Image: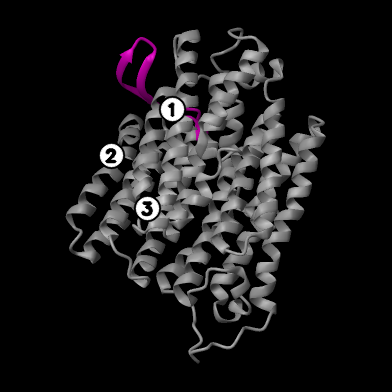
């Protein structure tokens, strides 16, 4: 039985060791993929050993080493990080099952490199989840960017390389030009960057200075895809679909909104931000991002592009809800991190299954596809309910808390944004479902109607669709962790 401190280190060491073993087994595909699955299962087991400690109020942590006074590479497990680690480690198993089916079904090249980089990305994600201070988070945030770059450029085409340049350029420039100076300034003002209950900036800065510093942090965390620093996300859609699932559900964008919430709660402090009125601008910017991205999604015919802009919109729900600073809306923000993860990974899994089985990428090509791929499009339909915010899917719960918090605080702009964006969500998702099930399919030009994608892919997307519904009926763990974050 691992101690909590050992479990923290193991959560990063296990996927890192798995990456090494995967590379050594590269010439034996079955062994390579078995190592991937075992590594993912071991990681989830390690993360689960920490859950009882956190639920009981424990906050295990350790310091690896110090760079300067107040600048440590340190780890600590708090409720928000616990939830993020659970989401990422749990979905890695499902994504690995799906990836095996996808990579084999499409005869993808460089499969060993793919699985190695995936494991390294999960190691970085665990470092972000369990970071004990802003410096540690920044370090692993950058490692995550670098480890996912080869995944974005996996195909090696000119288009893939161009998308990779946008991906790497935007994420590295925002973090180094905006977030790093903010980190240094916070350390200069407070003498520390530790994540602390109640924050560390109380009585340190004037309201205007707080708002400016918050802007540096929020825009510096480019993975949150807040406009105008969002273009890396649609650019990265050149990657294979399992990578898109990693970017949108398992690690990258979740690392972004997780970091935004964590910085607001544990660096700035909710009370400090509320007293200074430092987040009013952020509510407006996030609200604009929600609506603008939804409008772009409405006109996108490419399925992955529509899903990408949907992600940009859905991420800003988390940012806006956190910026409202109301307890209910903050619970909604945390819940939405979990709800969006299982819902959006299902949508990308379905998109990949459609491409693998039918070689279709455009929504206009999907007439009647639900009759040929009922499991895939059934799962897609369930996930759309979550994105829209309808029961019995987990997105309903998170939106309920967001709207309740906005109304309790009389933030009518936020209420209007949520209502309008919900209608837009329905506008760009429901026609896909209608087209798939209720429009007659076009005749197959080759006379060979396709069926479902490979079994592993169908199993994975069915599992995540089931998790979307299960999380609606049993949201206790994410809600309990969210409340612990606010009431330690």
Which portion, as a residue range, is magenta?
Answer: 56-80
Q: Which residue is mark 2?
A: 13
Q: Is residue 284 magenta?
A: no
Q: Mark 1–mark 3 contact, CB under 8 Å?
A: no
Q: Is residue 69 magenta?
A: yes
Compared with residue 106, is residue 151 higher up or lower down, i.e. above or below?
Answer: above
Can you see residue 488?
Answer: no
CA–CA distance between discs 1 and 3? 22 Å
| Residue 129 spot, x, y in % from top left | 44, 35
CA–CA distance between discs 2 and 3? 26 Å
| Residue 95 spot, x, y in % from top left | 42, 57
Q: Which residue is mark 1?
A: 176
Q: Quadrant of the N terminus?
A: top left
Query: 465 or 118: which is nearer to us?
Result: 118
Circle 1 — which element?
helix
Compared with residue 68, is residue 478 higher up or lower down, i.e. above or below?
Answer: below
Left or right of residue 205: residue 240: left
Disc 2 or 3, which lies upstream in sequence? 2
Left or right of residue 287: residue 358: left
Q: Which residue is mark 3?
A: 153
Q: Quadrant of the C terminus?
A: top right
Residue ID at (67%, 59%): 299
Residue ID at (61%, 60%): 383
Left or right of residue 297: residue 221: left
Q: Where on the picture, by quarter, is residue 155?
A: bottom left
Circle 2 — which element?
helix
Residue ID at (56%, 29%): 218
Which is closer to the viewer, label 2 or label 3?
A: 3
Circle 3 — which element?
loop
Instruction: Describe the colour scheme in one phrase.
Output: one colour
Which is closer to the viewer, label 2 or label 1?
A: 1
| Residue 229 spot, x, y in % from top left | 55, 38
């Amino acid at each position: 039985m691992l101690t909590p401190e050992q479990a923290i280190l193991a959560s990063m060491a296990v996927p890192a060791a798995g990456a090494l073993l995967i590379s050594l087994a590269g010439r034996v595909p079955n062994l390579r993929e078995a190592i991937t699955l075992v590594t993912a299962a071991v990681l989830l087991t390690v993360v689960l050993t920490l859950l009882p400690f956190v639920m009981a109020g424990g906050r295990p942590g350790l310091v690896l080493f110090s760079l300067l006074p107040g600048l440590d590479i340190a780890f600590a497990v708090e409720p928000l990080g616990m939830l993020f680690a659970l989401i990422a480690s749990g979905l890695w198993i499902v994504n690995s099952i799906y990836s095996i089916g996808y990579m084999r079904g499409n005869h993808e090249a460089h499969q060993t490199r793919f699985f190695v980089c995936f494991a390294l990305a999960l190691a970085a994600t665990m470092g972000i989840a369990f970071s004990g201070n802003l410096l540690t988070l920044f370090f692993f945030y950058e490692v995550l960017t670098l480890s996912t770059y080869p995944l974005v450029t996996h195909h090696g085409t000119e288009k893939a390389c161009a998308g990779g340049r946008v991906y790497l350029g935007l994420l590295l420039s925002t973090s180094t030009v905006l977030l790093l100076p903010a980190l240094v300034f916070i350390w200069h003002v407070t003498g520390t960057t530790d994540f602390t209950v109640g924050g560390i900036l109380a009585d340190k800065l004037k309201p205007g200075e707080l708002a400016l510093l918050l802007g540096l942090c929020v825009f510096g965390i480019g993975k949150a895809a807040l406009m105008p620093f969002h273009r890396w996300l649609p650019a990265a859609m050149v990657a294979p679909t399992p990578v898109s699932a990693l970017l949108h559900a398992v690690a990258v964008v979740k690392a972004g909104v997780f970091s935004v919430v964590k910085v607001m709660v544990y660096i700035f402090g909710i009370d400090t931000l509320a007293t200074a009125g430092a987040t009013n601008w952020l509510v407006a910017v996030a609200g604009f991002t929600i609506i603008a991205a939804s409008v772009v999604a409405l006109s996108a015919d490419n399925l992955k592009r529509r899903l990408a802009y949907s992600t940009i919109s859905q991420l800003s729900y988390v940012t806006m809800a956190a910026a409202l600073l109301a307890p209910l809306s903050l619970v909604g923000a945390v819940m939405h991190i979990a709800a969006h993860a299982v819902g959006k990974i299902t949508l990308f899994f379905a998109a990949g299954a459609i491409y693998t089985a039918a070689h279709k990428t455009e929504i206009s090509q999907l007439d009647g596809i639900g009759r040929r791929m009922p499991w895939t499009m059934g799962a897609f339909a369930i996930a759309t309910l979550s994105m829209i915010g309808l029961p019995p899917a987990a997105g309903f719960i998170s939106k309920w808390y967001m709207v309740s918090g906005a109304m309790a605080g009389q933030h009518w702009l936020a209420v209007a944004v949520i209502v309008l964006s919900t209608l837009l969500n329905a506008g760009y998702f429901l026609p896909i479902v209608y087209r798939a099930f209720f429009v007659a399919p076009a005749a197959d030009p080759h006379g060979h109607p396709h069926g479902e994608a490979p079994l592993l892919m169908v199993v994975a997307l069915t599992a995540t669709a089931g998790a979307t519904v299960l999380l609606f009926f049993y949201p206790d763990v994410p809600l309990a962790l969210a409340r612990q974050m606010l009431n330690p």
